[in-house]
Amino acid sequence: MMSSRTRGAPRSLFADDGSPVRYLDRSACEALFARIAGFARGGGETGVSIESRWTGNLRWALNRPTTAGDTTEHIVRIIRSINGAIGQVETNKLDDASLRLSIAAAERIAQFYSENPDAWPLPGPQRYPAVHVWSEATYALDAAARSRAAEALVEPAAHAGLLSAGYVEVAAHARAVLDTNGLAAYGVGTHAEFSVTVRDTAGTASGWAGTDDHDWTRIDVTALAARAQEKCVASRDPRAIEPGRYTVILEPQAVHELLVYAIYVLDRFQAEQTRTVYTKRPGYSRIGERVFDERITISTDPSDPVCGYLPFDAGGYPYRAVTWVEHGVLKELAYDRRYALSQLGHDIPLPNPFAYRVAGGPTSIEEMIATTERGLLVTRLSDVHVIDWLTLLCSGVTRDGVWLIERGKITRPVKNLRFTDSPMFAFSNVAQVGAVARVHAPFPVMVPAIKVRDFNFTSLADAV
Amino acid sequence: MVTRREFLRAGSLAALTVGAGGPRLRRALATPVDVAPRAGDPTLRELAMTALDAARAAGATYADVRLTVTRTQSFRYASPPLDAEHVEVGVRALAHGNWGFAASPDWTLDVLARLGREATAQAKANAWRGAPPVELGDPPPPATGTWVMPVERDPFSVAVEEKLDYIRAAEAYARTFRNGSASSVIVFERQERTFASTDGAFCTQTVYDSLGHESFFSVGVNDPVTYRNGRRLVGFVGPTGAGYEVFERGKLLDLIPQLYEEARRQLDPKPFDIGRYEVVFDAGAMATLVDATIGTAMELDRALGLEANAGGTSYLAPPERVLGSAVASPLLTITADRSMPGGAATVQWDAEGVAPAEFTLVDQGIATTYATDRTLASALPAANRNDGAPHSLGCAVAESAGTVPLIYTPNLTVQPARDGGSFEDLVADVADGFAVVGGRVYMDYQQLTGEGEPEVIYRIRRGKLAEVVSGAAYLFRSPTMWKNLVALGGPESAVVRGMTREKGQPSQRAVHSVRAVPARFKDVSLVDLRGGVPTRQRA
């Protein structure tokens, strides 16, 4: 049933070869589920959701390693559904005695929550798309390899009298969702994350670059480190400019840091029953209406070869390829099983993975600069928060490099600024769209650089 | 930006909230999962020593081991309560002058020995050419013994239905008001921490964090015609080093009518003129401001640049220039401790086995020291060490044994003005200004500039609170704001607020408390957040 195919499938955790247990493989998850289900008392259904993860990381600052570690963790959530009542507990103690206590606790909570009018069966078998999210290179990047890679990156910064701080993390993440109705989802993927900040010793200039990918070999760490260093050097001696409305060229990282809030509220129930930016009027969403500039198309696909992800969520429901926004028009909003049952007459939810891709455009950042009479080039945004969820009005600050553009040329670095604007406004005021890049984000995200008119800077934020 | 932690939480919760109707409170729920070794169990010592021996044998010059059993119970909106228990063990080793770390959920002798070896191998792998070694300095007196945070009612000995009864009754009561509503996330946590080190420490302590994590209880009112809404949070909900009693004593039901009234006043907010005003902060807003600015900025790792690639650095840097200089009005004295009764950061020993010091961060406006741990204590200028020796002030925290210790803000106290009065007294001295009640403060990555968004902001006219105004926020630069502090409340006006701090890579979290008094500032810049935004999108 399950088809999260992985190349180079890893060895069993419980293989007796002396290798450390790094994450639970499929057979280990199935055996764990069988044990848990066997401890159930009182009939009904049993569901188990397992998140098992190995993480290796290295952190450095001031051109030297600061912390490094290898961590394994498992989180097992047990759901008991008895006559429609639900009880759940979470544990990582996997011995029989502990599991018996855990499932008994779930059963007691279920008794407590009995006669649930919204009851429905646990999911049962599901179909999932094939995905490509496993990288042997990522899984093999051990402590020594991480250290060698980072040391090589720090040298150019140190040589130039600058300070490098950064982070490398590699992980393997297995997710299994099983239930007594026949659901047996298992998937495993890798994840690699890299980011680096280069600062001058006086603390007056800072540059950053970062990304993530399931495949470590697709991250050009040398180029990213060089970019952070160039940005640091090029942002020295910034001058303050007046806040106000500017044409801004948002690099992909900055686009994501603003747009992510519009992704977060792609939800039908919220749009119809509460009020969000996707609400037309009470009870109705804006599906079918223009919400962004016509050059903005937002989609997600677990099978995407460059920003794919495990094809099911922690409830075992499939992620599907969806176009949320097409040429600026809202096409679809996510919904859960409760919504599907009550509004759509079926029981398959459409979960939002938060992973997303925005279609690219033809304009390079160089062309965007060349065609800007007066504007700003923004590396990234930081400390963004939502002021008003009804309009997605956000506030945050620029970080790690802002430059003034005058008559088609970058003329000087400027001090950081605080903005107050909404992604709904900004990405309706699009001037040009560039090439897409994978950005540094908690989920796979590919977005282009976008030139936006009249972006609203409200005050100076002269931190570095 | 939304952190990974928040995303993961939102994602898995959305998927797992399988739907629960109204609870039928039928019978008591016995205390669930609770079978890990507790303090005093000889297994703990054996496990710890196995890890330390393995690290030493592998060449570590220092090693420590943490074992944690974390129990949480959360009540989230209408979902069934969720009980969770996580056991973790982490070993940290110093070899060739570098740190290594390895962690696992498995408490077996084999795994502990492997973690000891792996942590040491990690450390050795990180010996870079030319990098200065970590200097731990003299070891602290070995932490030995057992300590349990004094609580009256362990939240896990209180039946689930008693808690649920209380929460649901409060929610139902709020709904009896016209267009009223309430929503809540209430989390209880207990963590049993065992620590041992090659310096001879072996100790176990039990700490509680009631109403922490993302806990809140809010009373709201929605106008179905205008879509306007008002919302007030219950002040005492936030990380607290106490048991269930803190929740019971909060007297939630008694607070609801007033919170509803305050929320209702927000439905008809009045416009105001942006400008610079005299502004009174209530004690809760002051606690938030202190924490977001000076509290965060005086974590030594931030000031030195170790967080540059994550949360950022500090405007109070470099330490050798900041220490001994004025960072605030002479009215401001901030002391720090990890012994405050009810303090969310209160412990007997920190995550490195150091008995935390009571110290002064800011003395009459002058910066006196930073929050430190063992790794960085030696980085402080010698003149600013307590007795000239580089020793930690005990500010190391590991969220659990699965994470490495980092420096976190301890409990802070804003010393009251000896003859200061109440919030109302401070308001009474303002002819024309504003009063900020609660809310949040959003800083940049150096805590240099910020935007405060009050939960409620009142106009003050002739010494009295007048209308609630709409969309007002305050913009500030920290050094100027603290220079413009003109009055503080007295001892009777103090409140304690729990705070959460996320930092590090991977991101981790710790909690602490801030005890603060109301304050008055001059020349605070008020802006209209919604005023600066186009009402119509440009075609």
Image (spheres, coloured by chain):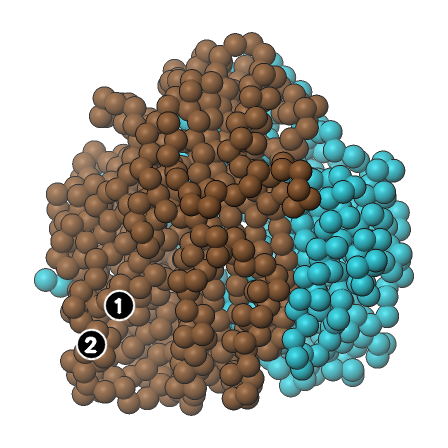
**Residue under pointer 1:** A449
Q: Nearer the viewer, residue B120 or B149?
A: B120
Instruction: Name the subunit of mark 2.
Output: A
Vertical position of residue A211 compared to residue B8: above or below: below
Vertical position of residue B9 compared to residue B32: above or below: below
Residue A413 visible, this angle: yes
Q: Which chain is cyan?
A: B
Secondary structure of the residue carrying numbered label 2: helix
At x 46%, y 30%, the residue is: A177
Report x, y in % for residue B491. Answer: 69, 59
Q: CA distance from mark 1 to mark 2?
A: 9 Å
At x 87%, y 60%, the residue is: B199
Q: In which quarter of the view is residue A442 placed?
A: bottom left
At x 27%, y 54%, the residue is: A357
**Residue under pointer 2:** A368
Report x, y in % for residue B206. Answer: 76, 42
Q: Which chain is brown?
A: A
Badge 1 amino acid = Ala
Vertical position of residue A445 compared to residue A99: above or below: below
At x 54%, y 14%, the residue is: A111
Residue B221 visible, this angle: no
Asked if the residue under mark 2 is in contact with the one under mark 1, i.e. CB atoms within 8 Å, the reply is: yes
How crowded pointer 2 is (Cα within 10 Å; few <14, some 14-19, many 20+) is rated as many
Badge 2 amino acid = Met
Q: Earlier in the sequence, mark 1 or mark 2?
A: 2
Instruction: Name the subunit of mark 1.
Output: A
Secondary structure of the residue carrying numbered label 1: strand
